Amino acid sequence: MNTDHANVLACIFPRLMVWQSREKKIANVVAPFPQATIKSWAEFDTIFAAYKKANNLHFRVRSSESAATYNRNHAAEIPSNFPWSHRIFRCTHGVSQDARFIGQRNRKARYCVWLAHFIPTVMQMEDGHFQILIRNEKHTYSHLTTRAEAASYLTTKALLIDDQDREDVKTLADARALSKQITNFLNERIGLRITPQQTRNLIHNIVGQEAAEERLKNMLHALVQIER
């Protein structure tokens, strides 16, 4: 084993112990996916979005099979209005990120071992029509599913802030306010608990966007001068 591998194991092993201890401490049973007649993937997406919002959950698609692939391998074909034959959704706590050796993550690492998941699958009913059924569902989580916990996982684009909030954050950043101070400001403004890392990401996003707009403005100005 080389030194780099040893360093990686030394970094990750303590985290595994923490994750396993958390798994033993928390068994959070959340309501299962709503029972409904789902006739399309669009209907599924609508119900799924409401389910995640109501229960403060975050999922990621781990794999899927297109209807075209399914139809090539099965006699009973799925109608063309279904893009997929099935999709596997897994709680993001059951999805790990690669280790970072330098710098800061752009989002929180939250692997918790317990693989809450479900598989929406297109099935043919007895009367011949097709609909989406929820299969192999596990809805016990090894982590909290509070509103505050869910808010800490929002990406920069998903943060519930408006143009005025962004302008105020830029003003504070220009005034060299600490990220902790800006975080406290945002927590009071939007009523959710966000992390200092989210604040840093937001600042980088705002500054980067304005820098890009300024560069574009300068390029357009230069083109106008050339045309003259």
Image: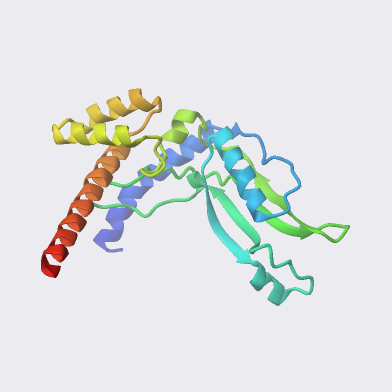
Residues 212 and 203: in front is 212
- x and y percentages locating residue 133 in the rendered image: 73, 52
- x and y percentages locating residue 89 in the rendered image: 58, 52
| Residue depicted at 39% across the width and 38% down the height | 159
Residue extending farthest to the right is: 127
Whether residue 100 is visible, yes or no, is yes
The image quadrant where one finds the N terminus is bottom left
- x and y percentages locating residue 222 in the rendered image: 13, 63
- x and y percentages locating residue 9 in the rendered image: 34, 53
In the rendered image, the vertical position of residue 169 relative to residue 124, given as above or below: above
| Residue depicted at 70% across the width and 49% down the height | 134
Quadrant of the rendered image containing residue 83:
bottom right
Residue extending farthest to the top is: 188
Apparent side of residue 99 relative to residue 58 in the rendered image (left or right): left
Whether residue 118 is visible, yes or no, is no
| Residue depicted at 22% across the width and 54% down the height | 212
| Residue depicted at 50% across the width and 29% down the height | 146
Quadrant of the rendered image containing residue 71:
bottom right
